[in-house]
Image (tube, grey):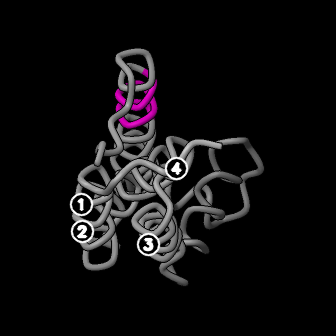
Amino acid sequence: MQLFLPTPRQASWLLLVGLLSLGEALYLRYLAIENAQVALACQAGLSTWLCATFRLTIMLFNHSAFGLLALGAALLNLIRPSIVLTAIALAAAAFGLVLHNAGLAGIAAALTILGLARPAPAAG
């Protein structure tokens, strides 16, 4: 029985996806959401790309979308391992952990790691 193991190229892409999503989440959190001047300007109606992203992020946070997406992708990846599902779960978990959806995103991160210990899908 062969375990689901990404190739070195796939692992590099997963690393890139994870770090880019982590960086974007940190950027949004510390330079938009928690920055008082930017947050107040966006809430006052400023229409820039940063404020549109700010509003979208707040709306998704209020519905726990990052944690739910990460959990759903991780569960599907646990059932049927796939590099695409691993990347989605990894990116959504990074956003969820940084943007205070830590409960669901933490479970999703653990399930994503467990997904790497699952048998590989049958070829053919």
Q: Earlier in the sequence, mark 1 or mark 4?
A: 1
Give the camera-side residue of 115 and 52: 115
Residue numbers of the magenta segment: 13-20
Secondary structure state at the residue bearing disc 1: helix
Q: Mark 2 is on which residue type?
A: Gly
Q: Sequence-wise, which precedes: disc 2 or disc 1?
A: 2
Say what amino acid the circle numbered 4 marks.
Ala
* Mark pair 1, 3: CA separation: 10 Å
* Magenta run includes residue 5: no
Q: Quadrant of the C terminus?
A: top right
Q: Which residue is mark 1?
A: 114
- Nearer to the camera, 2 or 56: 2
Q: CA distance from mark 1 to mark 4?
A: 18 Å
Determine which residue is flagged by label 3. Answer: 75
Q: Looking at the image, is mark 4 or mark 2 earlier in the sequence?
A: 2
Name the outermost residue toward the right. 47
The x, y position of residue 12, in whole percent, is 38, 19
For residue 106, the mark is: 2
| Front of the two marks 3 and 2 | 3
Q: Nearer the viewer, mark 1 or mark 4?
A: 4
Q: Nearer the viewer, mark 4 or mark 2?
A: 4
The residue at 46%/61% (across/down) is 77
Say if mark 3 contacts mark 2, CB within 8 Å.
Answer: no
| Disc 2 from disc 1: Cα separation | 12 Å
Q: Position of residue 85 (x, y in %)?
A: 53, 52
Residue at image coords 64%, 51%: 53
Quadrant assignment, res 104? bottom left
* Image point (41%, 47%), residue name: 25
Q: Is residue 10 left or right of residue 48?
A: left
